[in-house]
Image: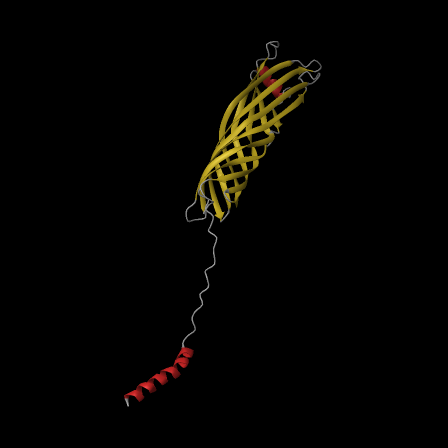
């Protein structure tokens, strides 16, 4: 009797097995998670090169007399009270800096750069002496030999692209000179003066930078700079003792810079 019960139970298990398997839920298929590229991180030290163009706002030169005779010449138009100089030319050099970026799109940075500049301007203003006879040539020259900045940067990054504002300290070597000639024809040099000085001031601007490939980034940038003004004492030459002691010419030393740059970021590829 027991043997029949065991055989019957085994048969029921065999017959019920496929039905039970059919009632079970199908095994879930798990798809592999997609590979997501890491967000670019701007943190780290970098260095690079830049080149561009600098130009001025018709930099003003204002001239005043050192004595009554010279002052009357300026007021009467015999010597120009004000002239404009289009100081422009090539600028190129190198930069280095450091960026900090935490778990935020905001990027803080500090950058220093120095540039060679081929920036010069010259103009000659022709005036008429108070006597009304003949003409006078008045020549003004200006040039900048090098330019540099130390600036803070605040940027906002969309992964590999960042826009930023920048500003800070600026410096440059500036040369200015003036030559005032006598009545044409003949036009002997009567007054002259020059100075060469390292001027300091400020700069502000902004730009956009893109992490191009690997450790390389490219940028374009605009800066306005103001290095103050320079006074040039325009005194009579030893061979010309008439006409008062001379003049003072004040040069404005400011302008605009548009440039492009290439940086190499050290220590990893930004992620």
Q: Is residue 150 above or below residue 33?
A: above
> As rendered, which of 51 and 5 lies closer to the eye?
5
Q: Is residue 82 among what the camera can see?
A: yes
The image quarter in which residue 87 lies? top right
Q: Position of residue 19 (x, y in %)?
A: 41, 81
- Give the quarter of the image for residue 120: top right
Along the line of sight, the residue nearer the viewer: 82 or 26: 26
> Colour mode?
secondary structure
> Nearest the camera: 194 or 216?
216
> Is residue 34 placed above or below 149 in the rendered structure?
below
Please give the count of numbered marks on the rendered protein: 0
Q: Residue furthest bottom?
A: 1
Of all residues, the one furthest to the front in this rendering is 3
Q: Position of residue 82 (x, y in %)?
A: 61, 25
Who is closer to the viewer here, 39 or 100? 39
Position of the N terminus, as image quadrant, is bottom left
Residue at 38% in and 82% down: 14
User: Hey, which quadrant is residue 101 in on the image?
Assistant: top left
Q: Decide: is 181 above or below 112.
A: above
The reply to whether residue 76 is in sight is no
x and y, in percent, of residue 162 in the image: 50, 45
Name the residue rendered at 59%, 16% in the picture.
192
Where residue 33 sits in the image (x, y, percent)? 45, 60
């Amino acid at each position: 009797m027991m043997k029949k019960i065991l055989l019957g139970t085994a048969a029921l298990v065999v017959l019920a097995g496929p039905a039970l398997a059919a009632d079970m839920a199908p095994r879930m298929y798990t798809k592999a998670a997609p590979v997501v590229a890491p967000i670019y991180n701007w943190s780290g030290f970098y260095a690079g090169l830049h080149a561009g163009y600098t130009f001025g706002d018709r930099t003003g030169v204002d001239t005043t007399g050192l004595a009554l005779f010279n002052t009357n010449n300026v007021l009467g138009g015999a010597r120009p009270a004000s002239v404009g100089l289009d100081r422009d030319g090539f600028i190129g050099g190198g930069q280095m800096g450091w960026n900090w970026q935490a778990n935020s799109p905001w990027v803080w940075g500090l950058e220093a750069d120095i540039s060679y500049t081929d920036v010069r301007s010259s103009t000659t203003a022709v005036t008429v002496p108070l006597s009304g006879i003949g003409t006078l040539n008045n020549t003004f020259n200006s040039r900048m030999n090098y330019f540099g900045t130390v600036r803070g940067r605040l940027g906002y990054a969309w992964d590999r692209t960042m826009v930023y504002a920048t500003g800070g300290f600026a410096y440059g070597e500036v040369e200015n000179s003036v030559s005032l000639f006598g009545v044409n024809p003949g036009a002997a040099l009567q007054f002259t003066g020059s100075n060469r000085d390292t001027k300091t001031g400020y700069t502000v601007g902004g730009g956009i930078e893109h992490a191009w490939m690997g450790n390389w980034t490219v940028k374009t940038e605009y800066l306005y700079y103001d290095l103050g003004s320079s006074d040039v004492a325009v005194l009579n030459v030893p061979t010309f003792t008439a006409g008062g002691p001379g003049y003072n010419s004040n040069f404005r030393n400011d302008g605009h810079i548009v440039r492009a740059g290439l940086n190499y970021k050290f220590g990893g590829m930004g992620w």
